[in-house]
């Protein structure tokens, strides 16, 4: 489901104006440290690889949303292990002209089960990638992956100075 129904309703009111929406990134890993892999999706909207991402439903607990998105997008069951980082995305211009900025909660997650496959119309491909051989992707997504892979129990909070 590319546009959640509540966002479609908002768009009827505000058109393509920028929306501020809560979202999650699930960095799903499997394997031991020396052979760890990350689950990535090839997005249909921009043709780029990315970890599992999605907009939270109204009132949805973020960790529950991360697990829901992993199943919806890739048919895998995960454990949500910890909050890795909190930050804002750059402004996104969607193919239809809609503008958005996303409050992102990135979670470090572990694969529990399910054979990874394309499970929705948002993605063209799904695959496991070795941590040391990730495909090209946007820098802010690489940063989210790095935060999830960091051996730190505390979440990283992005701070941008307003001048």
Image (cartoon, rainbow, N blue to C red):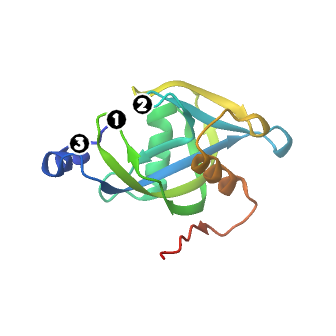
3D distance between C-alphas at marks 1 and 3? 9 Å
Local SS, label 1: loop
Tell me, for residue 2, which label it has, or none. 1
User: How dense is the environment of label 1, judged by Cα within 10 Å: few (below 14), some, or many (20 and up)?
Assistant: few
User: How dense is the environment of label 2, judged by Cα within 10 Å: few (below 14), some, or many (20 and up)?
Assistant: some
Q: Position of residue 134 (x, y in %)?
A: 71, 35
3D distance between C-alphas at marks 2 and 3? 18 Å
Dot in front, 2 or 1: 2
Local SS, label 2: loop
Q: Is residue 48 above or below residue 6?
A: above
The answer to which of 77 and 101 lies nearer the viewer is: 101
Q: Residue at the spot x=52%, y=49% of the render?
A: 25
- Work out which residue is located at the far front of the displayed protein and give it: 163
3D distance between C-alphas at marks 2 and 1? 9 Å
Q: Are marks 2 and 1 in contact (CB under 8 Å)?
A: yes
- Work out which residue is located at the far right of the displayed protein and give it: 34
Q: Position of residue 125 (x, y in %)?
A: 54, 23
> Which residue corresponds to mark 2?
45
């Amino acid at each position: 489901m590319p546009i959640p129904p509540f966002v479609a309703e908002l768009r009827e009111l505000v058109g393509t104006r920028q929306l501020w929406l809560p979202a999650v990134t699930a960095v799903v890993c499997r394997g031991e440290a020396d052979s760890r892999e990350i689950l990535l999706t090839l997005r249909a909207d921009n043709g780029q690889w990315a970890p599992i991402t999605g907009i939270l439903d109204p009132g949805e607990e973020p960790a529950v949303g991360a697990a829901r998105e992993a199943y919806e997008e890739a048919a895998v069951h995960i454990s949500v292990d910890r909050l890795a980082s909190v930050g804002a995305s750059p402004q996104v211009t969607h193919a239809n002209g809609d503008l958005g900025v996303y409050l992102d909660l990135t979670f470090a997650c572990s694969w529990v089960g399910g054979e990874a496959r394309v499970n929705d119309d948002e993605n063209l491909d799904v695959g496991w990638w070795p941590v040391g051989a990730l495909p090209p992707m946007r820098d802010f997504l690489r940063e989210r992956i790095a935060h999830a892979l960091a051996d730190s129990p505390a979440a990283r909070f992005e701070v941008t100075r307003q001048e």
